Image (cartoon, rainbow, N blue to C red):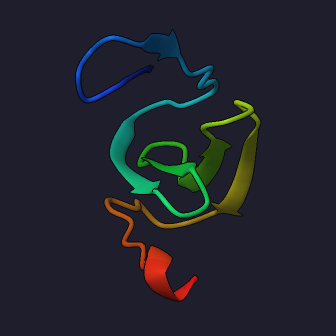
Amino acid sequence: MYETSLDRTRHRQLPLAGFLEATAVAVDWVANNLYVVDKIGDRIDVVSIDSGVQTNILNYLLKPVDVDLDPGHG
């Protein structure tokens, strides 16, 4: 997955690994994290946009399809 600036002057690759079928992505612009839903892997991971560190936060879900964030309320 690639990150790009709105004016398309800066690009870099985000190191996402281990997803079988990423079906949804949500951006937490306050904490600068990316949340990725893996429908086949039955999990949700969070990836730090700053460091690229990827961590599983929920697993053993039953076919997750979406994620909803409220960065304003943490």
From the viewer's side, name the closer residue of 39 and 15.
15
**Left of 49 or right of it: where is 40?**
left
The residue positioned 36% from the left and 72% from the top of the image is 68
The residue positioned 32% from the left and 59% from the top of the image is 65
Figure check: 13 above or below 3: above
x and y percentages locating residue 6 in the rendered image: 25, 29
Image quadrant in which you'd find residue 3: top left
From the viewer's side, name the closer residue of 50 and 47.
50
From the viewer's side, name the closer residue of 42 and 44.
44
**Left of 63 or right of it: where is 30?**
right
x and y percentages locating residue 43 in the rendered image: 57, 54
**Left of 57 or right of it: where is 27?**
left
Q: Which quarter of the rendered picture does the C terminus lie within? A: bottom right
The mark tally for this picture is 0
Give the residue at the far bottom of this rendering: 73
Give the residue at the far left of this rendering: 7
Q: Which quarter of the rendered picture does the N terminus lie within? A: top left
x and y percentages locating residue 42 in the rendered image: 53, 54
Figure check: 70 above or below 17: below
The residue positioned 40% from the left and 62% from the top of the image is 64
The residue positioned 58% from the left and 51% from the top of the image is 33
